Each structure stands twice: as C-alpha cells, then as structure tokens.
Image (cartoon, rainbow, N blue to C red):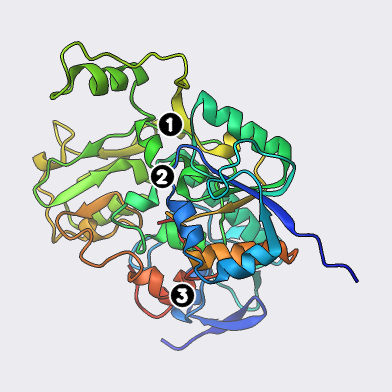
Amino acid sequence: MSEPRKLRVATTSLAGCFGCHMSLLDIDERLFTLIELVDFDRTPLTDIKRCGPCDLGLIEGGVCNAENVHVLREFRRQCKTLVAVGACAINGGLPAQRNHLDLRDILEAVYETEGGLARGAHIPNDPELPLPLDRVHPIHEVVKVDYFLPGCPPSGDAIWKFLTDLIAGRTPTLGHGLLHYD
Amino acid sequence: MANDDTFLLDGVAVPFNTGQTILQAAHAAGRYIPHLCWHPDYKPHGSCKLCTVKIDGRLASACTTPATPGLRVENRTPELDEQRRTLLQMLFVEGNHFCPSCEKSGQCLLQATAYELGMMGPHFDHFYPNRPVDASHPDVLLDFNRCILCSLCEQASARDGKFVFVMGGRGMRGRKVIINSATGRLADTDFSLTDHAASICPVGVILKKRVGFIVPYGQRKYDRAPVSVADTQGDEP
C-alpha cells in the first residue's frame, strides 16, 4: 500500500504580528510529526512567494490594505480549506482599534504632526506601498472562511489539536483550556 | 420552605419551590442554563434570550417562565445551543469585544458563555461602533464598547438608591446606558466602589481601576473552570 499523500499547507500573516506563526513553532518537537504529515507551500517558513494549489491555508491577521486583499484572495483561490488563525484574522484585533478614527487624521498624526518627526516629513506615497483601507476587516468579511482558530495567539497546544483534528478528517474542536479569545 | 414538586431538565428531575422560575430552580439545583442578563440577586430581564429553552415543545425564556410540576424542559440540545451561538455572535459583532486587551478577559460572562458553547468565530460582519470611554471617576473606568445592554447596572444602582445608570435611547444603534448626571460623566455622580452597581457588570464595562491585571490571564475564574461548572457552585461573578 502506498503512503498517504501529504497535505499541502500554506500560511501567511496579513495585518498580524507573526505571533500566531511563533505559536505554530511553539508546538516544539511535534513539528517533526507535522512535517511527516504535511508539505509547506507559500509560508514565511519556506519563503515561497506565491501560493500554489493547497489543501489547507492558515491566515494570520486581518485585512488592512490592498495587498492583504490580493494575498487573501490568492489563498482562497488556491486552498481547499481556509482557516482564520488568531484574534486579528477573526475580528480585526489590535489593528482594528483604528476603525473608529478617520484614516487621513491617523496618517497626518503619525507622519506629519507628531512630535519628533524630521522637518518636512510627509505621508509616504511610494507607488510600491499598498494603499491602506479605511477600516481593518476580519478575513471572513472578504472571503469565505471554513474554520476559525481563536486566540491571541492560539496556544501551541490549541494549534496542534486543531491541525491534528483537521488532518485526521475530524471537525476541529477546542475544549476548555484550549479555546481562548485572549 | 419544602420543595413543592419537580420538573424535568434534559430528562433529570429538578426540585422547585412555588414562585421560582425554571432558571432559579435550575441554578439552585446546581444545573447550568446559559444566561447573560440574569443574575440570581435581581429580577429577570428576559432580554438576552440565551436562556431560551424548549418547554413541552415551545420556546420560552427560562429566566421568566415559572416552574410548574412535570414540565419537560430541553436545555443543552444541539439545536438550542446552535441558536445560542448565533445570539452570541450577534452580540460580539454589535460591540467592540477585543478580548486580548480587555481587563475582564477570563472573568467575563459573555466570553465564558461563548467558550462554553464552542463559539469559534463571529460569522457576521462587525459593526465597529464608535462608543465612548469614561475615565472621569477616580476609582472606576467605564468602557461602553463592551456593553451588552443586560441592564444589571441599572437594577443594581436602583438598589443602591442612586440611579447612576439608566437605560436610554432606542433601536439597535441607539439603545445605551446613560450616566445620570448633568454632564453625563461618572465623576459627577455619587457613584462609589462600594455600590452594588460597581461589581455587577457581567462584561468589561464597569471596571475597577488599578486592579485589572493583578491576576494574570490564564489563571482567572473561567480559565480555571468553565462557566457551567464555576457558576453552579454558588460562586457568581
């Protein structure tokens, strides 16, 4: 009998802090078990820049600019199952604290009127910079999301339980102690 | 007073006294029915609908329905819990519930109930309402971003004889808690830390200053035990 095909997994951080990725690494020696079960496609761990066809996509962070929208849509196109990982992907999190403020006011405050700025400082306007959205959105407001894995970040144990459930073909569940929003 | 009779809650007999509601009797018997706006020391408000149960096939709020002999009450069924999750999701997107930065996280009834019911995500689009924070009082901070309109602060403040918190406004975006002072600021009321109303809030609106992180995340009430256990041991928040 042939070996079961490894699942292909992609991960990315949009408007996130990479804390959820750090928490993925926090599964520690279980990483050795994981790489027996999955191959990584686009992810900061491989530095592959574009997402190919995948079984599973893990998205950290919400959507705060145009590039986030493009990356998120690429993941949705390529991944059979898409998971919102962590508080920011699920409700915008810390970046969404700007949602009740006017975007121009924020940019002016940060780049033009705050103390300590160089003389003549202005709002960056390089064409390579992705344009910020007026509000930060959780990813399920932009694409269909199949599963949510909450936490800030979800603990290594929660990520491990979630992934092993999913890989085994079960609906992922997190009981008391693993399901956390903080 | 002796127990008059019993009703069946998920097939198990619950004793009750005449005049008790289904939720009161269940709570006294150490049985958990999910709830947010109900508190054992106050009149039922019947607004959050988390305690909706099926009584002989009909939906009713357990906090306002009197217990009567022989009722067959369904509580933790997959169907009812699914509806409760939807109610919770609507509450989460209607306010600004950012648990990672909330002092109440780990001892919040809204959060603990969502854990209990396995709410993994918000499902709906977020409102991101712009609600004020009132830090004017020397001892207490008010953050209305987290208000779920349970009205317990209004009831508790009435019991204090101070009427500091009053429900006002209309509609989904208009309904809110109003501070009963000429300026609308808490500092301009006679509110004090010893008031019932200072410790009644089930979520993170009414917060005592300078104690927020004395107990770290991960070691708090609902971190230690789920709400279905913690709140049925005579240990209300």
| Pick the front one: A21 or A141 | A21
Q: Mark 1: which secondary structure?
A: helix
Q: Are marks 3 and 1 on the same chain?
A: yes
Say which mark, if any, is on residue B27.
3
Disc on the earlier residue, 3 or 1 = 3
Give the answer, above or below, for where A177 lies relative to B211: below
Q: Tell me the kind of residue under disc 2.
A: Cys
Q: On the rendered image, what quadrant is the N terminus of chain A found in?
A: bottom right
| Pick the front one: A38 or B106 | A38
Image coordinates of residue A164 in percent, x first then y, are 65, 66
Residue in the image at 48% along x and 42% along y: A61
The residue where tag 1 is placed is B173
Q: Tell me the kind of residue under disc 3.
A: His
| Pick the front one: B73 or B237 | B237
Disc 2: which chain? Answer: A
The span from disc 2 to disc 1 (Cα, nearest Å) is 32 Å
The span from disc 3 to disc 1 (Cα, nearest Å) is 33 Å
Disc 3: which chain? Answer: B
Say which mark, if any, is on residue B57.
none
Q: Are marks 2 and 1 on the same chain?
A: no
Say which mark, if any, is on residue A17.
2
**Outermost residue, top direction?**
A120
**Outermost residue, bottom direction?**
B2
